[in-house]
Image: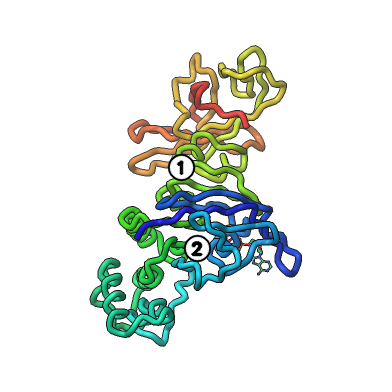
Amino acid sequence: MTGIAITVEACGKTFADGTRALSPISFEIGAGESIAILGPSGCGKTTALRIIAGLEGPDPGGRVLFDGADVTPLPIERRNVGMVFQSYALFPNMSVIENVAYGLRVRGVPRQPRLGQAQEVLAMMRLAEFGGRRIDQLSGGQRQRVALARALAVKPRVLLLDEPLTALDAALREDLRAEIDGLLRTLRISSVYVTHDQAEAMVLGDRIIVMERGAIAQIGTPRDIYFRPASRFVASFVGTMNRLEGAIRGGVFETRAGRLPVDRADAAEAVAFFRPEAARLTPADGAPLRFRVARCHFLGAAQRVYLDAGEGAPALIADTDNRRTWQPGQETGLAVSASDLLFL
Ligand SMILES: Nc1ncnc2c1ncn2[C@@H]1O[C@H](COP(=O)(O)OP(=O)(O)O)[C@@H](O)[C@H]1O
Ligand SMILES: [Mg+2]
C-alpha cells in the first residue's frame, strides 16, 4: 500500500438546519503523511473528515482532490478510503472474519480469495485466531483492532480515523495508539486521525491541524504547535501553559511578583505565556520573580509545584526534579529565560 496526496480546497459546510460547521478550510496532506486533526468537541473535526471520506459534500466552491484528481462528486465507495469510527460500527450478526472481508465482498471479490485476504489482515493485527468469533465475544480493544482490520482489508489509499480510541480505558488506549503508530509507519499509507486528545495527536501526527470553531487555528509539526503556538487558543489547548500578566517597559517585563528581562519592544500591557518545564525554581533571595508555594504534587518521575499567583489569578505551575521537597507557604524564586516567554 502507498499513500496518495490529498488536497482540501476551500471546503466549508453549512448543514440544512443552518448550522455552520466549517468555515471554508484548505490544507494539503502529502503522500504517506499522517495528519492529526485536533480540537475541542464541536469544532468541526468529524465534518472535515466526512468531507474527505465522501460521506458529506462541501458547500459549493469546495473541492477535494486525491493525487490532483477532483473526487468531490464521488461517494465514499468510489474513493477507496478506509474508515474507522469511535463506535467501531462492526456488524454484530457477522463473524470477525466476515466483518473484515465485508468491503471485499461489496467489491465482488470471490469468497476464497476474500477470506484469504481477510485472514492476512487479521494476522497483521494479531487477531489470527479470532476469525470465527462473534463480535460480542471480543474485548473493546479487540473490537477496535477488527475495525482497523476491516478498514485496511480493501487496501485503501487513505485511512481515516475518527476518535477510534475514545471508548477504551487509558492503558488500552496507549497500547492501541502505539499499535496504530506502528501500522501507519509500516504501511506508509496516508492517514487522517481525528482526536480531541493532544497526546494522540502528538504521537500519531507528522503534522497536526488544530481547529477552533470550524476554522483552522494552526497547522504544524507537534514541535511547532507546542513551542510556537500561533494563538492563545492553541497555546492553552496543547499542553499546560502558564500565563502571567504585566507590562513591558525598557526591556523588562514588570509583574506583581517581580521583574523579568525580555527581548521585546515595550508594551503597556502584556501577557506572558511559558511552559511548566521552562519555569526554574530558585532561592527566593535575589530572584527575578518571587512566589509562595501553594501545593506540590509528587508524581514519581516528576514533581509539579503550584505557585500562588495572587488573588483571582490561576496558580503558576513549575515542573521540577523529583528530589527536592516543597512545603505550602514556602517562598521561592522563579526564573524563566527570555527565549521561553511567548507574548501572544
Ligand atoms: N448533520 C448535522 N446537522 C446539523 N448540525 C450538525 C450536523 N453534524 C454536525 N453538526 C454540528 O456541526 C458542528 C461540528 O460538528 P462535528 O464536525 O461533529 O464536530 P467535532 O467532530 O469536532 O466534535 C457542531 O456544532 C455540530 O453540532
Ligand atoms: Mg467528532
Front residue of 317 and 191: 191
Residue lying furthest front in this view?
Answer: 69
> From the viewer's perspective, is 25 left or right of 335?
right
Front residue of 211 and 281: 211
Q: Quadrant of residue 272?
A: top right
Residue at screen point 42% across, 62% down: 157
The quarter of the image holding the N terminus is bottom left
Residue type indicated by callout 2: Asp
Give the residue at mark 2.
162
Q: Position of residue 328 (x, y in %)?
A: 49, 34
> SS for tag 1?
helix
Residue count near mark 1 (Cα–Cα under 10 Å), binned few <14, some 14–19, many ≥20: many
Q: Is mark 2 within 8 Å of ligand 2?
A: yes
Front residue of 122 and 315: 122
Give the residue at mark 1.
222
Q: Quadrant of residue 95?
A: bottom left
Q: Position of residue 67 (x, y in %)?
A: 48, 55
Q: Is mark 1 within 8 Å of ligand 1?
A: no
Residue lying furthest top in this view?
Answer: 250
Compared with residue 94, is residue 26 higher up or lower down, i.e. above or below?
Answer: above
